[in-house]
Image: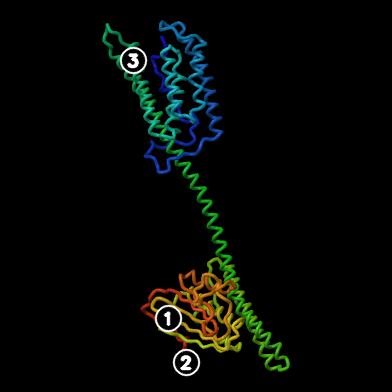
Amino acid sequence: MHLHEVFSFSTGVCPTMVGVESSITAPAPAATPSDTRRPLTRRDTRIDLWIAALTVVLGLATLWLSAVIVEDSDGPASPSTVESVLWLVCLCTPIAFRRLRPVTVLVVVSTVFLAAQLRGYPDTLTPSIVEFVAIFTANAWSTRRARALVVSIVVTAVMFVWLGVWLRSVYTSDAEAPDPVTLATIAYTLVSNGIVLVTAIAFGRAARVSAIRLHALERTGVELRAAHELVADRAINEERTRLARELHDVVAHHVAVIGIQAGAARRTLDRPEIARGALSAVESTARTTIDELDRLLSVLRSRDGETGSGPSGLDALPELMADTRALGLEVRFSVHGDARDVPESIGVTLYRITQEALTNTLKHGNASVAEVRLRYGDRSVEVEVVDDGRPGPTPYPGAVVHQATAGPGAGLGQRGMRERVDLHGGELQLGPRPRGGYRVRAVLPVGACGDARPHDHVTTDHTESA
């Protein structure tokens, strides 16, 4: 009697025996938009070669055991040993290419399986394992899921037809009706093998979805790492720009004042009282510079980013005007509109722009009068600084000017002003005036404030020229 009586698909085959790369957690859901899994590697090919070799070794062992069992049976004669080994090799060799051509391997393995069984091949254990691996791989690795599923269903149907025909020829005859034991045996065999075939399909599709998700996670991880590096580089560059802007704003004004006062002291050495006053101003400005640098360094050392105390806002504009007047430049300061509280960042920006504009007037403008106008609009705050000296450096590219020509030559100060204004989505205009002098105008948007209240420290200089 042959071992065909139990069509041994129900062999307890586990997906870990066939090189499953990822765990199986659930039946396959609908395909995701990016229905791709990781590409095949050389390691996968080597694993498949080892699986094919191991199935051949296992097949030789089960073939020998099957030959011993059916040697004295009354069933049909089995093929010769050489023919049986050839059938085994033909059955197991395609497994080496199971992930390269999964659907083709499934068709070849199923064809050889049926042909070998029709020839009376005595073993069913190893062929059943190979068939399970082929069905599983077709559903797990085929690039076309629908085609793999259709082929798997067709193969399963053919297997059921063959199994039914074989069971009928073994357990029934035309002379007698099958008894209940025979019917139960046929039903048990059909159900058990059907469960295994359907399980192979389900496991394969679930493994495919799991592998696709794993590959998507790996790809997302790579993209996240790249994005993290990009964001980190951008943050570093922005921080460097901010530090350069802060250092320039803090140091440039005071160093310019020191230079002017030192030059005045040098020219008035024959007048000790005037020279002493100039040197005293140099000393005071140097101390102020050190205090500003200490404040900036304390901000860099702190983790909460608090700016600390220091003259940097609309409240400090009168003090800035007084310091500039002390250097010999007449400054006319006026406020237009209803003064109100503005965000600290906007106040600091307007202060720094005013400071930089007055510093450039002192260094380059050869001016005698500078006018600073602070205007409060419904949804904006504006500062304008004009002088009556020679035109200063031409605006850098991107500045809004009222001249037909503009060329390169702007320094770090103008670049810093532009960067500060851009951070708030404002507008910056700077350039020489048609009638001489230089003009800097910055407009920053702020929300409408209904509870606007005047600042006590802001006063209007009525000596302002029109």
Secondary structure, mark 1, is: strand
Disc 3 to disc 2: CB gap under 8 Å = no
Residue 165: which disc?
3
User: Reading the chain from its start, which is encountered first: label 3 or label 2?
Assistant: 3
Q: Earlier in the sequence, mark 1 or mark 3?
A: 3
Q: Earlier in the sequence, mark 1 or mark 2?
A: 1
**Residue 393 picture location, percent across and down:** 58, 77
Residue flagged by tag 2: what amino acid is it? His
State whether residue 68 is above or below residue 261: above
Please tell me the numbered disc located at residue 462: 2
Residue annotated with mark 1: 376
Observer-nearest residue: 122 or 416?
416
Residue positioned 40% across, 7% down in the render:
75
| Distance from Cα at disc 1 to Cα at disc 2 | 18 Å
- Left or right, 125 with reference to 255: left
Query: How far apart in space, not on screen, are marks 3 and 2 (Cα)?
Result: 113 Å
Q: Where's residue 26, x and y in %?
A: 39, 37
Residue farthest to the right? 270
